Amino acid sequence: MLIVDDHPTFRRLARRLLEDAGFSVVGEAADAAEAIAAAMALRPGAVLLDVMLPDGSGIEVAKVLSRADSPPAVVLTSSRRACDLGIAVEDAFTRGFIPKDRLSSSAFAALLEGE
């Protein structure tokens, strides 16, 4: 999986949390351009993707990734609630949304499994 967030501290915490639960983190990215390049190069099965990146929207990144030959499962995250961001998750080419303060391996796994 790939973790995309502009805050290095969050990337470290998310990596530790998900790796401790058995997920394989193959890379990290700090902005939209890095996210797209890393996803195309690494071809992760899943991406944990911040909605608000310094150079663009995570939703736009998700749309780009959805057009890949083998698109990854994308889970959006933010320090804000989805309703505060105006996110229509079902229209965002993603598996769902998890607020950063509620990120857990079980919540992430449930979205990947389509629950």
Image (cartoon, grey):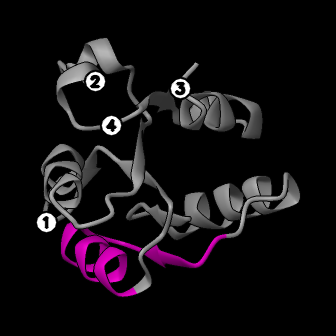
For this rendering, which residue is in front, 19 or 50?
Answer: 19
Marks 2 and 4 sit apart, C-alpha to C-alpha, by 7 Å
Rate crowding at label 3 as few (under 14), some (14 to 19) or many (20 or more) other CA atoms within 10 Å: few
The vertical placement of 53 against 50, above or below, is below
Q: Amino acid at mark 1?
A: Asp
Residue at 33% over, 20% down: 82
- Tag 1 or tag 2, which sits nearer the N-term? 1
**Residue 89 image label:** 2
Alpha carbon distance from label 2 to label 1: 20 Å
Q: Position of residue 97 (x, y in %)?
A: 43, 28
Viewer-nearest of labels 1 and 4?
4
Give the alpha-carbon distance from disc 2 to disc 3, as whole Å.
13 Å
Q: Amino acid at mark 2?
A: Val
Packing grade of label 2 (10 A; few <14, some 14-19, many >=20) is some
Q: Which mark is residue 94?
A: 4
Instruction: Return the residue at label 3.
Output: 114
Instruction: State which region is magenta.
Output: 25-41
Q: Are marks 2 and 4 in contact (CB under 8 Å)?
A: yes
* SS of the residue under disc 2: helix
Residue closest to the eye, 14 or 107: 107
Mark 4 against mark 3, which lies toward the viewer?
3
Q: CA distance from mark 1 to mark 4?
A: 20 Å
The quarter in which the C terminus is drawn is: top right
Inspect the image, locate mark 3, and give the three-letter code of the amino acid beneath it: Gly
- Disc 1 vs disc 3: which is toward the camera? 3
